[in-house]
Protein backbone atom coordinates (compact mmCIF):
# COMPACT_ATOMS: atom_id res chain seq x y z
CA UNK A 1 0.00 0.00 0.00
CA UNK A 2 1.18 3.49 -0.76
CA UNK A 3 2.33 5.46 2.21
CA UNK A 4 1.91 8.83 0.50
CA UNK A 5 -0.86 9.48 -2.00
CA UNK A 6 -1.09 12.53 -4.21
CA UNK A 7 -4.25 12.15 -6.26
CA UNK A 8 -3.72 15.08 -8.63
CA UNK A 9 -1.15 14.29 -11.33
CA UNK A 10 -1.60 17.78 -12.79
CA UNK A 11 -3.37 21.04 -12.05
CA UNK A 12 -3.98 24.28 -13.93
CA UNK A 13 -4.65 27.40 -11.88
CA UNK A 14 -5.08 31.04 -12.80
CA UNK A 15 -2.41 33.41 -11.51
CA UNK A 16 -3.26 35.07 -8.16
CA UNK A 17 -5.72 32.36 -7.19
CA UNK A 18 -5.13 30.13 -4.16
CA UNK A 19 -4.07 26.55 -4.81
CA UNK A 20 -4.59 23.42 -2.72
CA UNK A 21 -2.44 20.38 -3.46
CA UNK A 22 -3.77 17.20 -1.90
CA UNK A 23 -1.77 14.69 0.11
CA UNK A 24 -2.92 11.77 2.21
CA UNK A 25 -0.66 9.46 4.13
CA UNK A 26 -0.74 6.11 5.84
CA UNK A 27 1.18 5.29 8.99
CA UNK A 28 0.73 3.51 12.29
CA UNK A 29 3.68 5.36 13.79
CA UNK A 30 2.42 7.90 16.38
CA UNK A 31 5.40 10.16 15.71
CA UNK A 32 6.00 11.35 12.16
CA UNK A 33 6.79 14.38 10.08
CA UNK A 34 5.32 15.61 6.85
CA UNK A 35 7.20 17.63 4.22
CA UNK A 36 6.46 19.42 0.99
CA UNK A 37 9.08 19.96 -1.68
CA UNK A 38 8.98 21.97 -4.90
CA UNK A 39 10.86 20.89 -8.00
CA UNK A 40 11.03 23.50 -10.78
CA UNK A 41 11.96 22.55 -14.33
CA UNK A 42 15.63 23.07 -13.47
CA UNK A 43 15.42 19.92 -11.37
CA UNK A 44 16.55 20.97 -7.90
CA UNK A 45 14.40 19.95 -4.93
CA UNK A 46 13.41 22.90 -2.77
CA UNK A 47 12.10 22.34 0.75
CA UNK A 48 8.92 24.33 1.40
CA UNK A 49 7.33 23.39 4.70
CA UNK A 50 7.32 20.86 7.54
CA UNK A 51 4.60 19.64 9.92
CA UNK A 52 5.24 17.38 12.90
CA UNK A 53 2.55 14.97 14.00
CA UNK A 54 2.45 16.49 17.48
CA UNK A 55 2.44 20.10 16.32
CA UNK A 56 -0.67 21.81 17.62
CA UNK A 57 -0.89 24.39 14.89
CA UNK A 58 -0.76 24.13 11.14
CA UNK A 59 2.62 25.07 9.72
CA UNK A 60 2.98 28.25 7.68
CA UNK A 61 5.89 29.65 5.67
CA UNK A 62 5.14 32.83 3.81
CA UNK A 63 2.59 32.04 1.09
CA UNK A 64 2.70 28.33 1.96
CA UNK A 65 0.57 26.72 4.62
CA UNK A 66 -0.08 23.12 5.46
CA UNK A 67 -3.67 22.10 6.17
CA UNK A 68 -3.00 19.26 8.60
CA UNK A 69 -5.99 17.06 9.45
CA UNK A 70 -4.57 14.30 11.59
CA UNK A 71 -7.71 12.21 11.97
CA UNK A 72 -8.15 12.14 8.20
CA UNK A 73 -4.41 11.59 7.64
CA UNK A 74 -4.35 14.52 5.30
CA UNK A 75 -1.61 17.14 4.81
CA UNK A 76 -2.64 19.41 1.97
CA UNK A 77 -0.39 22.24 0.81
CA UNK A 78 -2.07 25.59 0.30
CA UNK A 79 -0.38 28.26 -1.79
CA UNK A 80 -1.98 31.66 -1.47
CA UNK A 81 -1.94 34.25 -4.27
CA UNK A 82 -0.24 31.98 -6.80
CA UNK A 83 2.50 33.33 -9.06
CA UNK A 84 3.87 32.22 -12.41
CA UNK A 85 7.03 31.08 -10.62
CA UNK A 86 4.98 28.56 -8.65
CA UNK A 87 4.71 26.41 -11.76
CA UNK A 88 6.61 23.27 -10.80
CA UNK A 89 6.32 19.70 -9.59
CA UNK A 90 5.30 19.39 -5.94
CA UNK A 91 6.06 16.39 -3.75
CA UNK A 92 4.55 15.44 -0.41
CA UNK A 93 6.76 13.29 1.82
CA UNK A 94 6.69 11.61 5.22
CA UNK A 95 9.22 10.46 7.76
CA UNK A 96 8.29 7.95 10.47
CA UNK A 97 10.40 8.64 13.55
CA UNK A 98 9.90 5.26 15.19
CA UNK A 99 10.91 3.47 12.03
CA UNK A 100 14.43 2.10 12.32
CA UNK A 101 15.09 2.92 8.68
CA UNK A 102 14.54 6.63 9.34
CA UNK A 103 13.92 7.39 5.69
CA UNK A 104 11.67 9.90 3.99
CA UNK A 105 9.04 8.48 1.63
CA UNK A 106 7.81 10.57 -1.26
CA UNK A 107 4.54 10.68 -3.14
CA UNK A 108 4.37 10.61 -6.92
CA UNK A 109 3.96 14.34 -7.19
CA UNK A 110 1.58 16.92 -8.62
CA UNK A 111 2.56 19.10 -11.56
CA UNK A 112 1.19 22.60 -11.05
CA UNK A 113 0.76 24.98 -13.97
CA UNK A 114 0.01 28.63 -13.19
CA UNK A 115 -1.73 30.39 -16.08
CA UNK A 116 -1.19 34.12 -16.75
CA UNK B 1 24.60 26.93 3.48
CA UNK B 2 24.36 23.18 3.12
CA UNK B 3 25.72 22.02 -0.14
CA UNK B 4 25.18 18.68 -1.80
CA UNK B 5 27.01 18.23 -5.05
CA UNK B 6 26.82 15.51 -7.65
CA UNK B 7 29.65 14.73 -10.03
CA UNK B 8 27.70 15.17 -13.26
CA UNK B 9 24.47 16.85 -14.35
CA UNK B 10 24.22 14.75 -17.51
CA UNK B 11 25.76 11.38 -18.28
CA UNK B 12 25.47 9.07 -21.28
CA UNK B 13 26.66 5.48 -20.99
CA UNK B 14 26.37 2.28 -22.98
CA UNK B 15 24.63 -0.90 -21.90
CA UNK B 16 26.95 -3.07 -19.83
CA UNK B 17 29.24 -0.26 -18.70
CA UNK B 18 30.06 0.22 -15.04
CA UNK B 19 28.79 3.61 -13.90
CA UNK B 20 29.76 5.62 -10.84
CA UNK B 21 27.60 8.47 -9.58
CA UNK B 22 29.32 10.51 -6.91
CA UNK B 23 27.71 12.63 -4.23
CA UNK B 24 29.47 14.90 -1.74
CA UNK B 25 27.99 16.95 1.10
CA UNK B 26 29.83 19.56 3.12
CA UNK B 27 27.78 19.75 6.32
CA UNK B 28 28.97 16.68 8.18
CA UNK B 29 25.59 14.96 7.83
CA UNK B 30 25.36 11.38 8.99
CA UNK B 31 22.54 10.28 6.71
CA UNK B 32 22.85 10.13 2.94
CA UNK B 33 20.40 8.84 0.35
CA UNK B 34 20.18 7.92 -3.32
CA UNK B 35 16.86 8.22 -5.17
CA UNK B 36 15.82 7.79 -8.74
CA UNK B 37 13.04 9.90 -10.20
CA UNK B 38 10.88 8.77 -13.09
CA UNK B 39 7.78 10.44 -14.55
CA UNK B 40 4.63 9.29 -12.80
CA UNK B 41 6.56 7.35 -10.16
CA UNK B 42 7.94 10.16 -8.00
CA UNK B 43 11.13 9.60 -6.04
CA UNK B 44 12.03 6.06 -5.17
CA UNK B 45 14.72 5.23 -2.64
CA UNK B 46 17.55 3.05 -3.94
CA UNK B 47 19.98 2.91 -1.01
CA UNK B 48 20.77 4.94 2.07
CA UNK B 49 23.51 5.16 4.64
CA UNK B 50 23.53 6.49 8.18
CA UNK B 51 27.25 6.16 8.82
CA UNK B 52 30.56 5.50 7.16
CA UNK B 53 30.73 1.97 5.73
CA UNK B 54 27.06 1.43 6.60
CA UNK B 55 24.46 0.91 3.91
CA UNK B 56 20.82 -0.08 3.82
CA UNK B 57 18.67 -1.15 0.90
CA UNK B 58 15.85 1.11 -0.04
CA UNK B 59 12.80 0.19 -2.06
CA UNK B 60 14.49 -0.55 -5.40
CA UNK B 61 18.10 -1.68 -4.79
CA UNK B 62 18.27 -4.26 -7.59
CA UNK B 63 20.98 -3.50 -10.11
CA UNK B 64 22.70 -0.97 -7.85
CA UNK B 65 25.30 -0.92 -5.12
CA UNK B 66 26.74 1.87 -3.00
CA UNK B 67 29.91 2.84 -1.23
CA UNK B 68 30.50 5.13 1.71
CA UNK B 69 34.17 5.17 2.62
CA UNK B 70 34.12 8.74 3.95
CA UNK B 71 31.36 10.57 5.78
CA UNK B 72 30.99 13.27 3.16
CA UNK B 73 30.88 11.02 0.10
CA UNK B 74 28.24 8.53 -0.99
CA UNK B 75 28.67 6.77 -4.31
CA UNK B 76 26.05 4.94 -6.35
CA UNK B 77 27.36 2.19 -8.60
CA UNK B 78 25.65 0.56 -11.55
CA UNK B 79 27.69 -2.61 -12.02
CA UNK B 80 26.38 -3.25 -15.54
CA UNK B 81 24.18 -0.44 -16.79
CA UNK B 82 20.95 -1.32 -18.54
CA UNK B 83 18.53 0.82 -20.54
CA UNK B 84 15.90 0.61 -17.79
CA UNK B 85 18.29 2.48 -15.53
CA UNK B 86 17.94 5.58 -17.67
CA UNK B 87 16.60 8.06 -15.13
CA UNK B 88 17.23 11.14 -13.00
CA UNK B 89 19.31 10.28 -9.92
CA UNK B 90 19.08 12.48 -6.85
CA UNK B 91 21.37 12.39 -3.85
CA UNK B 92 20.32 13.82 -0.48
CA UNK B 93 21.76 14.24 2.98
CA UNK B 94 20.35 14.94 6.42
CA UNK B 95 21.51 15.24 10.00
CA UNK B 96 20.92 12.23 12.19
CA UNK B 97 17.85 12.56 14.41
CA UNK B 98 16.87 15.86 12.85
CA UNK B 99 13.33 16.99 12.22
CA UNK B 100 14.56 19.10 9.40
CA UNK B 101 14.43 18.49 5.73
CA UNK B 102 16.77 16.52 3.55
CA UNK B 103 19.04 18.60 1.36
CA UNK B 104 19.22 17.49 -2.23
CA UNK B 105 21.87 17.67 -4.88
CA UNK B 106 21.10 19.04 -8.35
CA UNK B 107 20.58 15.57 -9.81
CA UNK B 108 22.28 13.52 -12.52
CA UNK B 109 20.32 12.70 -15.63
CA UNK B 110 21.68 9.35 -16.78
CA UNK B 111 20.95 7.96 -20.23
CA UNK B 112 21.92 4.36 -20.96
CA UNK B 113 22.02 3.55 -24.67
Image: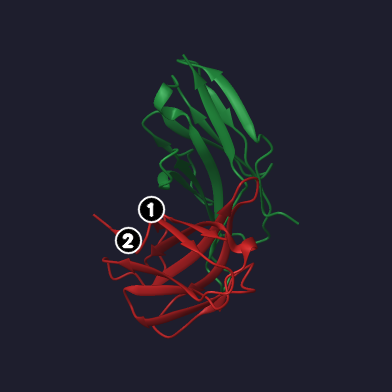
Q: Is B23 drawn above or below residue B38 in the view shown?
A: below
At label 1, counting other C-alpha atoms closer than 10 Å, the crowd grade (few under 14, some 14-19, many 20 or more) is many
Occupied quadrant, residue A6: top right
Q: Kindly state the secondary structure of the residue where label 2 is placed.
A: strand
Going 62% across and 47% down the picture, which residue do you hit? A108
> Residue A31's spot in the image, x, y percent?
56, 59
- Distance from Cα at disc 1 to Cα at disc 2: 7 Å
Q: Horizontal placement of A64 versus B29: left or right?
A: right
Mark 1 falls within which chain? B
| Chain A: drawing colour | green
What residue is shown with label 2? B5
Going from the N terminus, do you reach mark 1 or mark 2 first?
A: 2
Q: Position of residue A5 (x, y in %)?
A: 67, 45
Q: Which chain is displayed in red in the rendered image?
A: B
Contact? badges 1 and 2 (CB < 8 Å): yes
A65, A107: nearer the viewer = A107
Question: Depth check: A14 or A18 in front?
Answer: A14
Q: Pick the quarter of the image with the N terminus of chain B.
A: bottom left
Q: Residue at x 34, y 69 (%)?
A: B29
Give the class, few, some or many, for how many residues have Cα within 10 Å of label 2's Cα (few <14, many ≥20).
many
At 28% from the left edge and 71% from the top edge, which residue is drawn?
A: B28
Q: Is residue B70 rendered to the left or right of residue A116?
A: left
Parent chain of label 2 = B
Amino acid sequence: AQKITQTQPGMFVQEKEAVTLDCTYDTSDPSYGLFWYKQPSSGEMIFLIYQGSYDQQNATEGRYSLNFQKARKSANLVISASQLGDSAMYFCAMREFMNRDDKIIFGKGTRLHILP
Amino acid sequence: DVKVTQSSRYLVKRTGEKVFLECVQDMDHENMFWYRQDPGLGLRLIYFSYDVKMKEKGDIPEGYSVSREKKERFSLILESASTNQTSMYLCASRELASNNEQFFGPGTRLTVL
